[in-house]
Image (cartoon, rainbow, N blue to C red):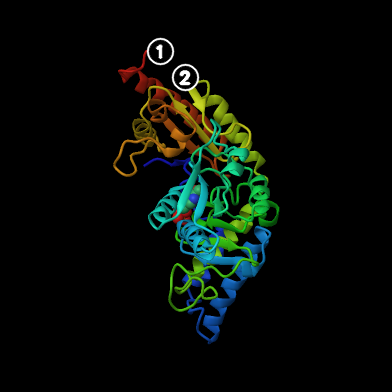
Amino acid sequence: MEKLVYLDNAATTRVSKAALDAMLPFLGDSYGNPSSIYSVGRDAKAAIENARGIVAAAIGAQAGEIFFTGSGTEANNWALKSAVALRKDKGNHIITSAIEHPAVLKTAEYLQTQGCEVTYLGVDKFGQISLSELENAIREDTVLISIMTANNEIGTILPISEISKIAKARDVLLHTDAVQAAGSIPIDVAEMGVDMLTLSGHKLGAPKGVGVLFKKKNLKLLPPLIHGGGQEHGARSGTENVAGIAGLAAALNYRVSQLPQTKLAAKRDRLVAELLKIPRSALTGDPVNRLPGIASFVFEAIEGESMLLMLDHFGICGSSGSACSSGSLDPSHVLLAIGLPHEVAHGSLRLSLSEDTTDEEIDFVVEKLTGVVAKLRKMSPVWDGE
Ligand SMILES: *Cc1c(COP(=O)(O)O)cnc(C)c1O
């Protein structure tokens, strides 16, 4: 097949050179178990502690506040479930938003089956929650607020430090899913004022299957989700993914060294400007407070799946919130939450860039996508325009 034009970096990323270099020793000669006392084991242990320090420094935390997990999903599960367990004497009410990743939403739904009450805050057309609505939603028995730092489908960045002021004033724990934000915009846990924060390796140039939960040190050790040999201070058992952990730290460190991603944002802006020349197209998400790499659209009278298949024919990888992920044809909960009618939400497309995205690739995508939209509309029974 021809060369891929990979514009789905919000789904996963290529492993960066920094990450690969950091990982290779632990896939080769340095294969010791970090819990063993001989030197090859101690080397692995040292690599994990080194990685912990790097991750901590990258987000303004202390090493003891960083816990490695098997994914961003696990970290989100752990944050929500353990906050509820830790604060059970205070109550069992959680506040989250309607546009969270399923790793938060489905965990919240599970907790509802266990007796928790959950408030799902709605969002405006840009994907922003209302701070006054948040304030009004807090009750005596509210134990946790979980709001993402930036959304994975529409790129909207949420005001976590503002949210934190409200949470702190009412003594409510704050967790944020920073999986999309980390490595794309600066993350500082003190400035953001969060108690817990989630990262995932494969969204920022590390391999799949490794994540992080930051937990502020004045918060008690979280009840484990996974029990066993007592790794991660007894909080998360299982022999560590040494290579993955080293890779995550190196990838994050590299990405942070490249901030701010002004060049990337300029490429995204050019892509957006060009694609909005397509009739009856619109940008989704916040036009200003958005991640530098995410361009997301809806095209009227288009079926997202068909668009993806036709783009794939040209080697272009994107994604659509209308993808029938669970065999259902419901459009994404995020696009419905920002108020798009079902039929419009079906024509969504997310193109997520990386620093490797070239101007030539952007030109190629603009040309091919403009053609694809025109062709699909010509075949569409619902297209009445020109
Ligand atoms: C990808 C993603 C996750 C899940 O992370 P995994 O490591 O793939 O489990 C959680 N939240 C957001 C916002 C994501 O984009």
Residue 161 is left or right of residue 106, and the answer is right
Q: How many marks?
A: 2
Q: Secondary structure at mark 1?
A: loop
Query: As rendered, which of 375 and 291 lies closer to the eye?
Result: 291
Q: Is residue 319 visible?
A: no
Three-letter amino acid code of the residue under disc 2: Arg
Residue 147 image position (x, y, % from top left): 55, 48
Q: Are marks 2 and 1 in contact (CB under 8 Å)?
A: yes
User: Residue 265 lies in what quarter of the image?
Assistant: top right
Percent coordinates x, y for residue 157 in the rendering: 60, 41
* SS at circle 2: loop
Q: CA distance from mark 2 to mark 1?
A: 9 Å
Is 331 situated above or below 241? above
The residue shown at (59%, 69%) is: 220
Q: Is residue 232 left or right of residue 164?
A: left
Q: Residue at left 40%, top 12%?
A: 385
Q: Which quarter of the image is occupied by the C terminus?
A: top left
Is 122 drawn above or below residue 256 in the view shown? above
Q: Residue 280 — which label?
A: 2
Indicate which disc, 2 or 1, sits on the residue closer to the N terminus.
2
Return the x and y of residue 277 as percentages of the image width and height: 52, 20
Q: Identify the amino acid type marked 1.
A: Gly
Crowd tier of the residue under label 1, counting other residues whose Cα lies within 10 Å: few below 14, some 14–19, many 20 or above: few
Label 2 within 8 A of ligand 1 by Cβ: no
Q: Estimate the x, y position of residue 342 in percent, counting from the top left.
A: 38, 28
Relative height, residue 370 to residue 207 (above, below): above
Disc 1 target residue = 385
